[in-house]
Image: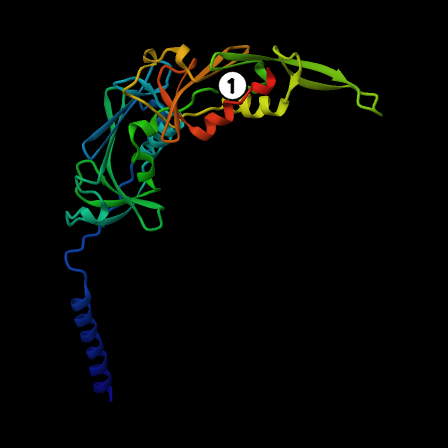
Amino acid sequence: MKNMKTFIILGAVILGLILLIIFRPTGQVNYSVPRLTKLDSSKITKVIIEKNNEKIELEKDSQNKWLIMPQGYPANQDTVKSLVNNAAGLEIMEFISDKGSYTPYELDDNKKILVTIYSGDDLARQFAVGKSSSTTSHSYVLLANDLKVWTAKGNLRVSYDQSSDEMRDKTIFNFQSDSINEVLLEKGGKSVTLTKNIRKEKPEGSEEETEITEWISNKSNKAVDENTVRTQIIQSMSNLNCENYLEDKKVTDYNPADASYTITLKGTKDYTLRFFDEKDSRYTAIASDNDYVFEIASWKATNIMQDFSDWE
């Protein structure tokens, strides 16, 4: 009986060893996950992003503003700060592969995005970004001088897979609406000037006066629709962004007198916006606060270009 029990135990051990041999991973090595030092984002002064034969270079100027080089285009500061923070705080999560096969992770030469950041003249970090995981909570990456595929925290591809135009600052105007006290509209040789007038009025049955804002036409000397002036013209221009820039055009190529519609807002500062031709649901335009020719979506433009024939 004792011998039988011994044979059963021995058989179980042998079976376990056989199963271990059969199902053990072949060639699998357990690598320690790299713990990268978190860099100080404020000390990053240059970012180079390379992908599919395209190179985007971002540099800080003396005012700590990010520019797209070599043209010196103002970049979207929030966009660049986000990708800098991602690079500076890169966090490796898990080892994936050391087989040298990068295509499944979009880390091959045709798909990978190479990110290099500098602090002054010193290389601070370099890594390659592949596709994001199925849950988009992680991304496949390659570290500098390391052929192994790892996952990193976050959907990094969203930050770095952008064109230089997408990274440009698309802000045309940014001002407070209540700083404007005069609106000049010009179209087809005709014009009208609207001047803000604030009067006090005591509503019937009330002892307190309230302020009423009016916009008075210089042609009719009458008040025009206040809501149209305030919301569709002034507020639309106060936080106006363009869709894209026309890099093959210069502001000097456009004669202000040839504009199809011009809006000038006057207040603590003057703001002028000029629209020219329309093509593919976009208007070509130039503005006093911008050094470049840009395009505005037609629906935005028509919202601003009010028909002022009834205000004359």
Using the image as rendered, state which of residue 114 and residue 196 is in the foreground.
196
Dot 1 falls on a residue whose secondary structure is loop
Q: Nearer the viewer, residue 272 or 268?
A: 272
Residue 299, horizontal then vertical, whole percent:
46, 30
Quadrant of res 169: top left
Q: Say above or below: 215 vs 150.
A: above
Residue 58 lies, in percent from the top left, at 29, 23
Residue holding disc 1: 175
Q: Position of residue 302 (x, y in %)?
A: 48, 26
Mark 1: which amino acid?
A: Phe
Q: Which colour style is shown?
A: rainbow
Left of 12 or right of it: where is 226?
right
Classify residue 80 by image quadrant. top left
Residue 131 higher or lower than 207, as above or below: below
Q: Is residue 5 visible?
A: yes
> Residue 31, can we see it?
no
Which x, y percent locates residue 204? 83, 24
Q: Quadrant of the C terminus?
A: top right
Task: Name which residue lies at 29% across and 21% down.
Answer: 247
Q: Residues within 10 Å of mark 1 (few under 14, many from 20)?
A: some
